[in-house]
Amino acid sequence: MYFFSVLFGLIQFALISYILIAEVKKKSAAAFLWATLFVMFAFPHLVTAIIEDMAFSTETILKSSVFVVGFCLVYLLFRSRKSVGFVALRANRFFEIGESGIEGTAFEQLCFFLFLIAIIGYIASIVRAEGGMMNTSWSGARSIQHGYVSIAGLAIRFIFMFSGLSLFFFLTGRRIKAGIVLLLFCILVLITRNRVQILPVLLFFISLYLLKIKTIRTGHIITGIVLGIGVIYIVYAIRAFRYLGTISNALSNLSWEYINTMVLKFLGSNNGELGLRQYFYFFIEQKNGFEGFNRGYTYIRMLLVYIPSQFTFGLKPQSFDLYMGKAIGMIAGGTTHPTLFADCFGNLNWFGIALGGVWAGIANGIDSVISRERENLYKILLFYLASYSFVVIGRGSVYNGFEEFAWGFLFLYLLKTYLFKLTRVRLVFGNKTSYSQIADTH
């Protein structure tokens, strides 16, 4: 049994590595999904299969490998082989701006304006509620409600919807604007201590590196591993910083020794992102014998993503992460996100392997939209939003990541379409063109 456990541990590691490299070559946002799964599952799971460092049977570890191998094979079966037409790299320079219709005008200006209003307003609301910046803390930031119609909820959607502005401004030579976007995200993380909110900053640097890769070499793989280690350290460091309470208290107690000690403690105890896979093993060992499992709740919610739960007459179930939280013994309202693989298994048991085809289809659809798009800004905003969502999905917060992209895509599409028509009409009337001439242009 141990031999087969190690063998399938190696096979799943090889398959996830192969898919990750293929997605990087295609310049697909799905590369971030598989990079997350590589860091959070493929490598640590291989280590578990070899040294058996968790309190689960060898049979359970083998079964989890078999599930992942099946998922990956189905994904590869349905995944498109086409490259994503993202940006062109000419003479070591990225695309030239100004080739398409509304960039640099109303759309770009409005996106930047909405982003600034959203993130500055959101930060200010937390600071005001906490009685000053020095009194802000993770618990205080969490107390702000994020609903469909709440101001805070809308602000958060706008913030991540326009987070790709940093990459767009940088690629078009406007480094100061790019720096402003990144700085505001750093301030946001300082105020909220929310680890997911550092993603737009990390994605900026990783995306720049990804776009410059033409042929993957050994050096790229080594750099990727170093980047992965750096991301893990930063995420755990933010968590350690969170434990210090308010900024005022943190300034008195923060030190590199404290951060390093806490990060090593998290790593050694499987307490954190790298330990979430243990709940996948737990679900397998218990044969999904929990309330809400084996019913596909995540995917029912995804199908009804644009309809608030209160308007679905009970058709839209509560979030599956609540059921997973209850299954592992969390208090009422507690949630857990133990990687995409665990979510798929929890939703449909062994039939969850077939969901590899669903995620291949979603990746195909996103790549297709980005490839066909002519507007560079819109293309980058979608790529960035999809990349962010795929990281969240890979971590296991599947519905939340999907919802973020679904609403962001819809809003950006409507915003761009409306402004394109508005700009065109303004130009037409400015040139005193008749309605018949407008019709001739279509």
Image (cartoon, helix red, strand yellow):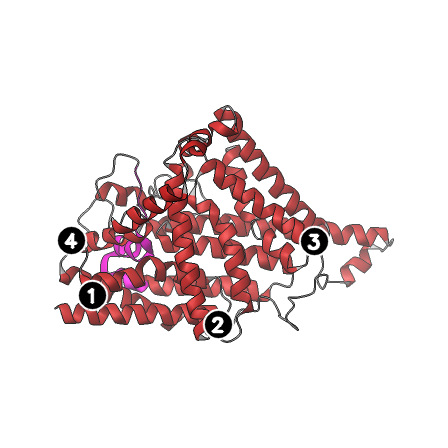
Instruction: State the quadrant of the C terminus.
Output: bottom right
Q: Where does the image place residue 396, in percent across and percent down from the top left?
A: 34, 52
Label 4, secondary structure: give it: loop
- Mark 2 / mark 1, whichever is N-terminal: 2
Give, as a three-letter code, the residue at label 4: Ala
Provide residue 21's location: percent of width, then percent of height. Answer: 42, 71
Q: Nearer the viewer, residue 321 or 254?
A: 254
Q: Is residue 345 magenta?
A: yes
- Whole-angstrom CA distance, mark 4 to mark 2, is 38 Å
- Which numbered marker is on residue 420? 3
The answer for how far apart the CA atoms under marks 1 and 3 are is 57 Å
Depth check, mark 3 against mark 4: the one in front is 4
Q: Which residue is mark 4?
A: 55
Looking at this view, name the residue that lies furthest to the right.
432
Estimate how packed mark 3 is, as few (under 14), some (14 to 19) or many (20 or more) residues with alpha carbons within 10 Å. some
Label 1–label 3 contact, CB within 8 A: no
Give the percent coordinates (x, y) of residue 68: 28, 64
- Closest to the observer, 399 or 94: 94
Q: Which residue is mark 2?
A: 25
